[in-house]
Image (spheres, rainbow, N blue to C red):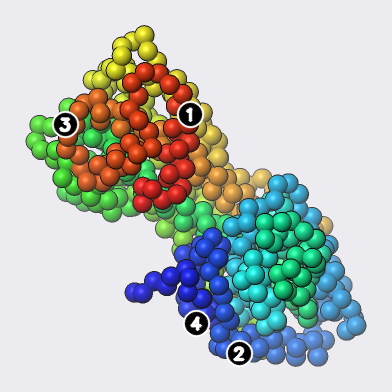
Amino acid sequence: MHKPSPHQTLLLGEEPISIETLRQVARDRRRITLSHRLERRLQQARAVVDRHVEQNKPVYGLTTGLGATADTRLSQEDMIAYQYRAIPARAVGVGPRLPTDAVRAMMFARLAGLAAGGSGGSYTLAEALAGALNAGFHPIVPSIGSIGAGDLAPLAHMGLAMIGQGEAEWGGQILPAVEALQRAGLQPVDLRHKDGHVLIVANSLSVGRGALAAHDIDDMLNIFNLAWAMSMEAFRGNVSPIDARACAARPAPGQENEAARLRALLHGSALFTVGEARRLQDPLSFRCAAPVHGAARSALDLVREAIEIELTHSADNPIVLTEAEAILSNGNFDMTALSLRFEMLGQALAHVGTLSARRANKLMAANFSGLPRFLSPLGASWQGFQTVQKTISALESDVRQRAQPVPLTLLPVSDSVEDHAANTPASVAKTHEMVERLAYLAAIEMIVAAQAIDMRKLDKLGEGAERGYRTIRRHVAFLEEDRALGPAFDAVAQAIFDGAFA
């Protein structure tokens, strides 16, 4: 299937929306055009909204207040003014501001939800979101304030800037939103019935940031496969655990596919020669990579499935059903499934990171690797990689701490009407935060493995391991005399993020 270039304009309403589509918009600044089909879909849903207004039917957030004030009916004269009041009233976020790619991901996720047709938002609102993304207009959004029963606070700060209040970033400057709109050639969005509620009602931060996390974690799992392959060469490990026959005997989730990836990285290696392995059975951190990495990949697949459902369907409350000409209150905004899948993924990543840490330490241990202690070629009076074990321990502990679950400890809010939430933004954020720590663990393992490969004077590596080794040596020289290694770890971690190992 043809994969569009991020430089090609996205025709929203015609092209499928995926995690990759969102990443292109959020990070590559892919432009968006709204299709005529999308315009018709939104107008049809909008007609249902207009009829409910005309008939003054009780509809949450349209003819009534929001949250605990759902029992309060709005007068005809107050309905549009209420949409403007609903946004600043929920702009209660605090803490560090979200990075620009997360803000853009949130904006696009809200636009994607609007495009599904169930929100009842106006076409003008969709145009405003697309126009802001195309112009590089980025609301300033604090990172703390949502518990995942709709990302109300983050979306309210986004909406605040869209109506010309609050602050926004444009052209690298943080400005009053009204000034940023002017510089971007935009106007404050003209809210109609329901539009203010539509802007704030979704879980767009959880979905948008979750999509970016899923993309980054997929890349990181590939890096850990490469780190394992390099360590196997350095350790002279036994490849029988990735034998297709062994893995097929117990096809655990993801194991067979991951074993195939690992075999590909070692293709052409002397390790497949009988008698090349130093041990009959290696430590579990070497032996169990396929099932552990496979479990993480399987957990990631579940996360991707949940996110792409959110990107392609309406989760608004209430939902506008065009064919039935109905507007129904619902609980479709509940994100328990996504929270639990991110918690599962985070714990799986912690296992992956722990295996990496232990492989690196095993390579430094003379009784396991058969190499000089701490991989110093100059003898025991030199430190080699000894103190690096403290950095490894700190990173691995940090990852495990972020694997602890967060969805079960929330207070009821909104006068106890909203007495359940899944804390999805926290589940997503802490899992995504693992990526930086994991990149350092992988970087250290690959640098340690490259040192051991050189000390063994190996001249035939598997194809993937060879590429990884050469990339490491372009960034980090062999450790002869003791030197500061922190800059080397920074350089390789940055190379991982720059795609040097792709």
Q: Residues within 10 Å of mark 1 (few under 14, many from 20)?
A: few
Front residue (pair 242, 128): 128
Q: The residue under label 3 is which amino acid type?
A: Ala
Q: The residue under label 1 is which amino acid type?
A: Gly
> Which residue is found at the position 77% from the left and 70% from the top?
182
Secondary structure of the residue carrying tag 1 is helix
Q: Quadrant of residue 474?
A: top left
Q: Is there a contact, CB below 8 Å, between mark 4 and mark 2?
A: no
Q: Which label sits in the foreground, 3 or 1? A: 1
- Spatial separation of the CA atoms under disc 3 and disc 1: 32 Å
Q: Residues within 10 Å of mark 2 (few under 14, many from 20)?
A: some
Task: Give the answer, above or below, for where 46 lies relative to 415.
Answer: below
> Which residue is found at the position 45% from the left and 33% from the top?
489
Give the residue at the far top of this rendering.
381
Q: Is there a contact, CB below 8 Å, between mark 3 and mark 1?
A: no
Secondary structure of the residue carrying tag 4 is loop
Position of residue 82 in the picture relative to residue 359 (left or right)? right
Q: Quadrant of residue 416?
A: bottom right
- Spatial separation of the CA atoms under disc 4 and disc 2: 12 Å
Position of residue 352 in the picture relative to residue 71 (left or right)? left
The numbered mark at residue 277 is: 3
What percent of the width, then of the height, locates residue 387?
45, 20
